[in-house]
Image (cartoon, rainbow, N blue to C red):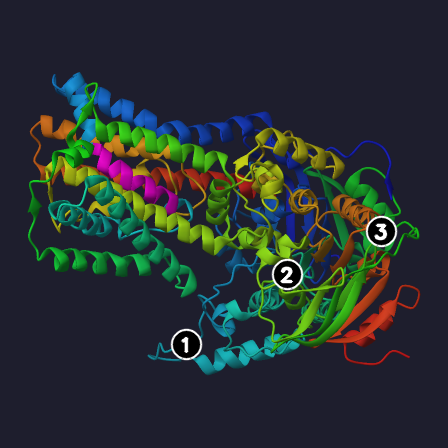
Amino acid sequence: MSTSSREPLLRMENITKRFSGVTVLGDVCFDVRPGEVHALIGENGAGKSTLMKIVTGLYEADSGKVFWKGSPVEIKTPHQAHVLGINIVHQELILVPQLSIGENIFLGRHPVGGGLSRWVRWGDINNQAKSLLEGLGHPLDPTRTVAELSIAEQQLVEIARALAFSAELIIMDEPTSPLSEHETTRLFRTISQLKARGVSIVYISHRLKEIHQVADRVTVLRDGRHIATKPIAETTTDNLVRYMVGREISEQFSDKSPHVNGEEALRVEGLTARGKFSDISFSVRRGEIVGLAGLVGAGRTELVETLFGAGEVESGKVYLDGQPVAIKTPIDAVRHRLALVADDRKAKGLVLGGSIRFNVALAAPKKFARYGVFLNSAREREVANRLARELHLKTPSVEQQVMYLSGGGQQKVVLAKWLSADSKVFILDEPTRGIDVGSKAEIYDLIRRLAERGVAVLVVSSELEEILNLADRILVMHRGRIAGELAREDATDESIMQLATGGDVH
Amino acid sequence: MATSGAPPSAPSDLPSDSQRWRRAGSSMMRRFGPLLGLLVTSAILSFLSPYFLTFDNLINVFRQSSINALLALGQLLVIITAGIDLSVGSILGLSCVLVAMMLKAGVPWPLCILAGACVGTVLGMMNGLLLTKLRLPHPFIPTLGMMNVARGLAFVISGGFPISELPQGFRFWGAGTIAYIPVPVILVVAIYALFHVFLTRTTFGRDVYAIGGNKQAAMFSGIPVDRRLTMVYAMSGGLAALGAIVLAGRLNSGFPLAGDGAELDAIAAVIIGGASFFGGVGTVWGTLIGALIMGVLRNGLTLLNVSPNWQKVVIGVVIVAAVWIDVLRQRTSTKRKLARK
């Protein structure tokens, strides 16, 4: 933990920022020492991203001062931030999908030949890109197009991009949310290497356990105010949560109450899609929660999306309630009362410009329509209001556009959509990614209540703690195959990880 | 799992009153902006020319805008899905010639109208099928192809010559009046009312907005995207054929060059009327106002003896201005989105 207490690398004093009269940051002070990992936490809307946008030149503070290496600075553009040595790895990735990994990493800063030659040195680009990615534990071919990569792999490229230059301060915004525990550990190793080189890191994350592993100090923001800054050793997860939320959240994970395990709702036999997964067989019963664990790239998202009809199947059979079904498109899936809460809610789950009511009614047109054709707004509003209450969705009205909700709020709308469609099989892919602590707990509660109501639930998650606490049974995938199955009682972090990395469990 | 006490106040999850007013203001601009534009333009023109604000002239404006209005309605549907239909002018030409030839051959006019409408719808459906089945990257491509194909066919089957002197019964649809109001105007109002209900009150309409708002999310919600898109392009083609019928009726002739460039006027009307190229946004009545604004401009400038060439310049400027306003609107809403975090 030792970082010599020299002059802080970055010091922000009394930063205030208002948007249309709403104070988003009020008198916030924040500093980062050289070679330190400083975690920045707070619920969605607490002001973390806004604060970082000020440091990286996207916003200007209404008042307050920023000091870099002791001297006052005004960072008015992202370019100025880069020149100072401040880099950020965004939560919402900003890569150019059509270009290759190497090109993205060196975007705008291509190394060129010496002297008169201005030709770009592609060899250098690809070699350096390769070693950066290897250093992050994920050797990707730097000539591959970014569009082909999964979200998790893209984020790795973004991290490599920030690392590619002599940044002195790297801000990481939820860097591990698409990474599995394995990758996360490797990332932490890279972070320690950076620390040893004297690079500082601002680590924004909702994952409090990780923060205890990697951070030196932690700062908590709430509602735009600075609540506390402490050395990590002086904090516990519980009191951090209390700082963040302002109240107690007791036991995110209660003991699971035994519930009815009914008949088999979903059965998959020998499902294969070339290049993505092979010979997948499993079943889910009514009232059961089956977890699907594995590393990034194991094929879980591909599997569940194919189950939902959004991918090609080479061979294999799927049975619903014992009957064989052919699900070739999501239209079939919805007709058979399947639900998919996809991993990327903004891209796959919501029409952001639409209202809550609009989005909730999307999957169940016949339910709300007279003669199956004419919309019934009163009924839609009624159902949307009821679901909003049930899910504790904070909103003045269901006519509110979904784009203005927080991540947790948006995810609740997606859940409401499928609830209103009376789905019998719920597939959730990373249901709590990028969601604040309070909403997470509410979503876990909802998943359990779903199971109690007799819905068959399949949860894909990279958060081991999440899977361990939710699932009755855990399937672990490794490289497109099911490596093993663990009952609740037998499952531990290690046993899951062993299966996920291709080992055996004894 | 229990959370003790009241939920924490997270006011930044919800818009403040002033933010809500701003947002209401922005959506008001979207809804009433075009109407305001129409009223302002009309007011200015009525000052500049004494002939403008007469009943005859205004009815004239409406009648002259009716064909564009019909095409623009189809284009609106397509643009809401974040697409475009470049073929409507050519489909109009082909339908025009076809209907004229059938009439001249003695086919009773109701059948001709039906046939014309069918041809337009089928051609439009082909646009949709090409787009969805061939998985073409953008509707620009099949409709560009169709634009050329239909226009070529129009010349082929007509030999390049106009077909004139059409039967009286048919001409009613383009040139007749009911209680001093031109039939095309009544047609436009009726069809627009129908489509207003269609777009705002049916599941089909909601699906169209969803597809434009986020095609992938629409697909993942079980909406039959390909089917809806095909239907939308079919409607665009069908409305173009209706425009052909009105045109042939008015000019008393069918000619292969009919509707040349009409697609661009249709797109202009849709955009001026407040729809967004990005999809998911746009209203039926806004499009009508867009068509009327163009009609008013053309009419007013003609009354002021401005040459048709300069009129084109003015229309071009208005189009760019309308899109610029759309961009500004988008930018302020994104800024607000950033503020959320």
Above or below — where is A30 with respect to B187?
below
Q: Verify whether residue B70 appears in magenta.
A: yes
Amino acid type, callout 1: Val
**Overall secondary structure of the magenta stretch?**
helix
User: Mark 2 and mark 1, same subunit?
Assistant: yes
Instruction: Please name which of the two marks, 2 or 3, marks the residue nearer to the observer.
Output: 2
Amino acid type, callout 2: Phe
Subunit of label 1: A
- For numbered disc 1, what is the local secondary structure? loop
Image quadrant assignment for residue A226? top right
User: Mark 3 and mark 1, same subunit?
Assistant: yes
Crowd class of label 3 (few under 14; some 14 to 19; many from 20; radius 10 Å)? some
Above or below — where is A471 with respect to A30?
below
Subunit of label 2: A
Q: How many marks?
A: 3
Numbered mark located on residue B140 in the image: none
Measuring 87% from the left and 40% from the top, which residue is drawn there?
B2
Q: Verify whether residue A353 appears in magenta.
A: no
Numbered mark located on residue A237 in the image: 3
The first of marks 2 and 1 along the sequence is 1
**Towards the viewer: A112 or A198:** A112
Q: Which residue is mark 1?
A: A112
Amino acid type, callout 3: Thr
**Stretch of the chain drawn in magenta:** B65-78
**Towards the viewer: B280 or A368:** A368
**Towards the viewer: A34 or B154:** B154
Subunit of label 3: A
Rounded to the nearest angstrom, the CA distance separating label 2 from label 3 is: 37 Å
Does the residue at mark 3 contact the one at mark 1 (Cβ under 8 Å)?
A: no
Q: Which residue is mark 2?
A: A308
Rounded to the nearest angstrom, the CA distance separating label 2 from label 1 is: 47 Å
Measured from the top left, where is residue A354 in percent x and y?
54, 40
